Image (cartoon, helix red, strand yellow):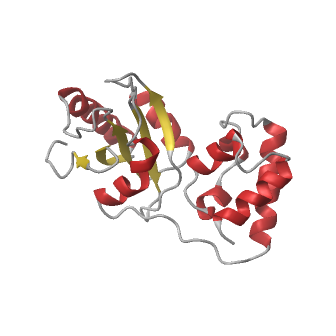
Amino acid sequence: MNIYSIKTALADALCVKESSPMIQELFSRFVTPYELLDASELEFTRIKGVGPAKARQIVSTLKLARALNTPLESPYVIRKPEDAFQLMRFVVGHLMHEEFWILPLNTKNHVICKERISVGTLNSAIVHPREVYRSLIQRAAASYIAVHNHPTQMTDASPEDIQLTKRLTDAGELLGIELLDHVIVSTDNYCSLKERGLM
């Protein structure tokens, strides 16, 4: 079973089109069927238009998909900064405003989901460690990658980017959830603060 057949099944179960904002956001947050099938009702209720009843419907539909016992796509694994870039370049790289996302990872560096934390302006996105780590704790993440874009398409890290990375790293050390990297992306290029020695 692939992501497209699951999308069709969910759209049918929820009586919406596959192109509906609800379905699009659902499949934007969860990278592969592997992550989608492991998500909880609570995680689904964070999607606009999904209340407790619809969340239960989604979980029931996914349980049926799991019961079919058909092969699933492999989970997306982050091995190097370019992997995060390839996953996110067409999600945020083209935007004309800044967005800050996280990629929570399990102990095997499998991406649990993609989650937008903050939507900003032309040149900034306000991010507080509280929001970042609340989500990571709820998802039982072992570590994570931070990702954001620069609308200028210039991916060099700003002093504010470096400062934010330090705050997130310090908070992660206290909570035991490591920030592995902070990657700034455009559609064609990226900057890894880890590779640049900036964290």
Q: Residue at x 85, y 53 (%)?
A: 13
Q: How many marks?
A: 0
Residue 4 quadrant: bottom right
Considering every residue shown, the one lying at the far left of the view is 197
- Counting from the top left corner in percent of width and height, residue 34 is at 61, 64
- Counting from the top left corner in percent of width and height, residue 17 is at 77, 47
Quadrant of the rendering where the N terminus is positioned = bottom right
Between 71 and 131, the one lying in front of the other is 71
Q: Is the residue 61 above or below the residue 196 in the image?
A: below
- Taking the image as shown, residue 128 lies to the left or right of residue 35, namely left
- Taking the image as shown, residue 71 lies to the left or right of residue 57, namely left
Quadrant of the rendering where the C terminus is positioned = top left
- Taking the image as shown, residue 32 lies to the left or right of residue 69, namely left
Between 63 and 21, the one lying in front of the other is 21
- Taking the image as shown, residue 33 lies to the left or right of residue 57, namely left
- Counting from the top left corner in percent of width and height, residue 78 is at 38, 61
Q: Residue at x 35, y 47 (%)?
A: 187
Q: Residue at x 40, y 28 (%)?
A: 97
Q: Residue at x 62, y 51 (%)?
A: 27
